[in-house]
Image (cartoon, grey):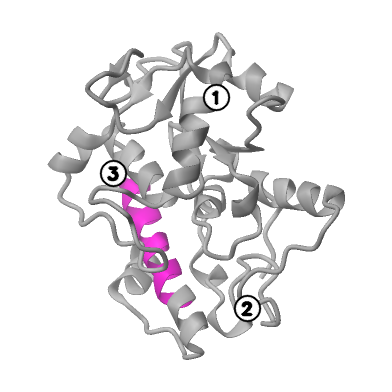
Amino acid sequence: MTFPAHAIDLLRSHCEATSTRVFNARGATLKRCPQCHLGLATCICAWRKHKHCELEFIVLMHRDEVYKPTNTGRLIADTFPDQCHAFLWSRTEPDPKLIELLNDEERQCFLVFPASDSEQRAVVASPTRRDSNRAPINTVVLLDGTWKQARKMYSQGHWMKHLPILDLSAALANSEHDWGNYKVRQACERGQLATAEAAALALAANEEAVATEYLLRYFSVFNEHYLATRRNTRPQITDAHRAIETDG
């Protein structure tokens, strides 16, 4: 199964073309699907659907994440290829196209990060719903890395200090979904979410229920298939698989 290259595919290709060393992730000898990068026997491409959402996403990736098969940022681009942008993190030399997006007057950009009690930036609990095509495009910036890396990106990204914080803690508390289900990596603290979950929660805060539901199902399928890859077993067909087959 072949899909057109999306933003994260293109970013990975760029990194491969410009890298001076080969990155050997865990399981480097495994024969992988060139699309989802899981094992050929545990490929998730059959459950990948092209969806649309009102939000747009900027996935700001730590270089370590680009090659990791455990990365969930790519699930966002898989699902919403027309609404997802991706860039490498750089403290001192951010991509000019990224800066252009962040400063675009036709966008309202938000940085997703838990707000502290001493937060000096503007903090909002949800994007303002667009009431016309002339309204700014709500765009969510996601810091894609480990929590330690994300904290550094947050504190050192002086070129995004002007962005208001989208604090999703209220949406998390009010949601009926079970969050924090990233079985591949262990969160250090309660409430820490995978990048794909953070995107789904932002969609929920923007009242995009259908998009939220699909992304969470796809994330669940990814979890099952990655663990099957790690265990060298066949993935189980779960309720998430069946729901995607039935409802998309």
**Is 171 positioned to the left or the right of 22 in the image?**
left
Camera-side residue: 50 or 184? 184
Predominant secondary structure, magenta span: helix
Compare marks 2 and 3 and give the one earlier in the sequence.
Answer: 2
Q: Can you tell which of label 2 and label 3 is closer to the viewer?
A: 2
The residue sitting at 60% across, 61% down in the picture is 68
Camera-side residue: 95 or 9? 95
Residue that badge 1 annotates: 157
Rounded to the nearest whole Å, what is the CA distance between mark 1 and mark 3?
A: 31 Å
Compare marks 1 and 3 and give the one earlier in the sequence.
Answer: 1
Residue that badge 2 annotates: 27
**Is 131 positioned to the left or the right of 229 in the image?**
left
- The magenta region covers 209-225
Q: Residue furthest bottom?
A: 233
Label 3 is placed on what type of residue? Ala
Compare marks 1 and 2 and give the one earlier in the sequence.
Answer: 2
- Residue 127, percent across and down? 33, 23
Label 1 is placed on what type of residue? Gly
Is residue 219 inside the magenta stretch? Answer: yes
Camera-side residue: 101 or 49? 101
Rounded to the nearest whole Å, what is the CA distance between mark 2 and mark 3?
A: 36 Å
Residue 209 is tagged as: 3
For label 2, the crowd category at 10 Å Cα-Cα, with few meaning under 14, some 14 to 19 and many 20 or more, is: few
When asked about the image quadrant of residue 206, the answer is: top left
Q: Is residue 248 visible?
A: no
Label 2 is placed on what type of residue? Gly
The residue sitting at 72% across, 26% down in the picture is 93
When asked about the image quadrant of residue 97, the answer is: top right
